[in-house]
Image: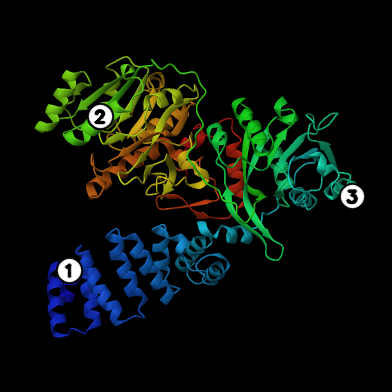
Amino acid sequence: MGDAARDRQDWQDAITNYGLALVLAPTNLPIRIQLGHVLKEAGRWSEAEAAYRLACAADPADAELRLHLGHVLKMQQRREEAIEIYLEALDIDPSLIIARNELIAMGGRDFLPKGQYGRPAISASLGRISGLLDQNLDAIREWLTVSTYPVEAYHNFRSTFPVQPPPAAAGSSLVVLIDAVDVDPDLLRLSLNSLLDQRDSNWTAVIRASANLHEHPVASYACQDSRITFISDDAKEPWPTQGPDLMLLTEAGCSLDCEAVGWLRYASERTGADVIYADHDHHTYDWRRGATYSRPALHAMPDIHDQTNTPDPPLSLLVRTVAHPLMVTFGAAAGSEWRRSILVNALASGLIVAHLPRILSSKRISDTATMVHAPSTRKSTRCTDSNERILVIIPTRDQADILMSCLDSLKEKLSNPQAVDVLVIDHRSTEADALNLLSERVLSGDIEVMKVDEPFNWGRFNNLAATRQNHDIFVFANNDIEFLTQGWDDVVRSSLADEAVGIIGARLLYPDRTIQHAGIAMGINQGRPVHEGVGADMASGGPMNRWCRPRQASAVTGALMAIKRSIFEAVEGFDERLAVAYNDIDLCLRIREAGFRVLYEPRLEAIHHESKTRGHNVDDARVAWDDGELADMYDKWGEAMLHEPGKNPHWVSVGSRAHDGYRDLSMSQILHHLDRSALINPWVIRQEKTKME
């Protein structure tokens, strides 16, 4: 009777009959397992968990039982326990692919036991690619999964995939400039040896060194090889006569990959860029075991904000000598800051800057060296008008408690209250507390209220509000926002004072102080846009501290965003056809299409009591609506919905995590990224609007 009820999906009847069967046969394991299954289907997860745990105790060697137990723990949002159970299942049966994939989907790639990634797993997967077409396709998908390396296995990834040679390039004259002022001789020796090992040997080198190095044995490299020249540390011009076509700037302690010169020369020839930067990492060294690689600096496409405050400026930088006067002299700053200033000046001057997604260099660090990522403390030096008027627009409906918190925090954190007005859009509030709050705040002069009595449409409501008053800046905020930044209005004015910036978005935290939004990345979760950093501790900086630094983003959330009125009107505001979701992303894409930057600004910080306003898309109707608006977005924007210029292609995305592990790149992937990056502004949406076949 239980089986019959299960087959017709009458879960309650099945639960009753399997329970009665167990009364008669309490040690019958298959019946207990079936009871767990139907309890799970009925949504009675804690009872299903109990049934599966008893079954696991009765059969400790059954991996699939632990898989089912892991599923119900995951459904109860008990991530750590679910990961532990999935690992137990893999210990019992390492070939249980579902358990491995569940671990990866839950962000547990770093917990994978050895053998589930890297060479052993790749070999095992390739051995399974045989048989029927469907079997082959499954095996290929599996191979792609296991060839992705977890974040903690970066050294294994780096060691497994050496840099492949570039296509052939012409022989433009190239000088390698090595800054070796005030460094230990062994670091310069490391760099010179890596230079001598280059497969492309068509180079000369100029070493700017302190006086003590000129008399050290390391200077004998210049005697052994006529391509190497030492100059004094006070030299401004690296050569007395006509310079070369190309200069490769680096520093002592940098070990260049043997393909570095060849790749950079080829990238210059292919793109015609004035400046090219590549990726790098760091390493410690043991004379017996060799190098141990860590801390990859995997850069995004060219972005002046990102390069101004990145903790890891490019270690190898190729420049054309005719590009800019700053590039043919040594700057006052040395090392990484010298290269940073050249790169930032090139971006500010509108020169063509390209990013080559190849790990071409590695910086030697000591065994005890650590990298501490702290929020950026760089302050804007732009002149701002503290009297620029800001209008904060807040749609609301009832929920007096969260609206009061929003209004109070907004006012308390202002630097110039006289220049900030608040307009609350009241959408059919009926609760007495909410109506009393709105009335009191209007009488006190804190806010104005605009009543809207029509079906919900977030974009339309904000468009209506934006026509009401004459302000320089609009701040769109949800009613469940709690402002944290003291002087947030100054941050908004300062960030928008940059004429290139069209809109800024905030760093948002959940009430438990984990990250809710650190910019939006496109094309991540099965092609969907996702918030970066979701669930990470607020102290976590993310890769290269990106969640704590101002940088360009593909889009930012409308839960808290600020935009210049002139730009909002120029792009004609929000698209009112997108009534619920994606209207904020659509606005950001249109701003990028118009040539302006979308800036993620972590100095603007707030708590977002997400789900108190509209809730999550948990029922079929909401999911269908969300998918419909997403389809409209893809029809409108095409490939721009899938292309993320802020993500280095080495990073693998899984679920909502944009930085879940590492992958090697094919030649076509490398060149596709390189060519896109060499556009005058790779963040501007151009031909991406064409849909992919």
Residue at 23%, 75% in the rendered image: 34
Label 1, secondary structure: give it: loop
Question: Tag 1: Cα neighbours inside 10 Å, few (<14), some, or many (≥20)?
Answer: few
Q: Quadrant of residue 559?
A: top left
Residue 227 marker: none
Residue 324 in view of the camera: no
Three-letter amino acid code at the position of disc 1: Arg
Q: Position of residue 136 (x, y in %)?
A: 49, 67
Q: Spatial distance from mark 3 to mark 1, Cα to Cα?
A: 84 Å
Residue bearing mark 3: 224
Q: Viewed as shown, does residue 290 lie left or right of 462? A: right
Q: Residue furthest left?
A: 432
Q: Nearer the viewer, residue 20 or 280?
A: 280
First-in-chain label (3 vs 2) = 3
Cα gap from disc 1 to disc 2, whole angstroms: 55 Å
Task: Specify the quadrant of the image occupied by residue 530.
Answer: top left
Q: Look at label 2 and name its amino acid.
A: Asp
Residue at image x 66%, y 50%? Answer: 362
Mark closest to the chain's N terminus, 1 or 2: 1
Residue corresponding to mark 2:
408
Circle 3 residues within 10 Å: few <14, some 14–19, many ≥20: few
Q: Foreground residue, 180 or 348?
A: 180
Mark 2, Cα crowd under 10 Å, few <14 / some 14-19 / many 20+, is some
Please tell me whether residue 409 is drawn above or below residue 256 in the rendered image: above
Instruction: Identify the residue position indicated by label 1 in the image.
Output: 8
For the point 61% across and 26% down, which residue is it? Answer: 350
Percent x, y for residue 357? 61, 46
Mark 3, mark 1: which one is toward the viewer? 3
Label 3 or label 2, whichever lies nearer to me, is: 2
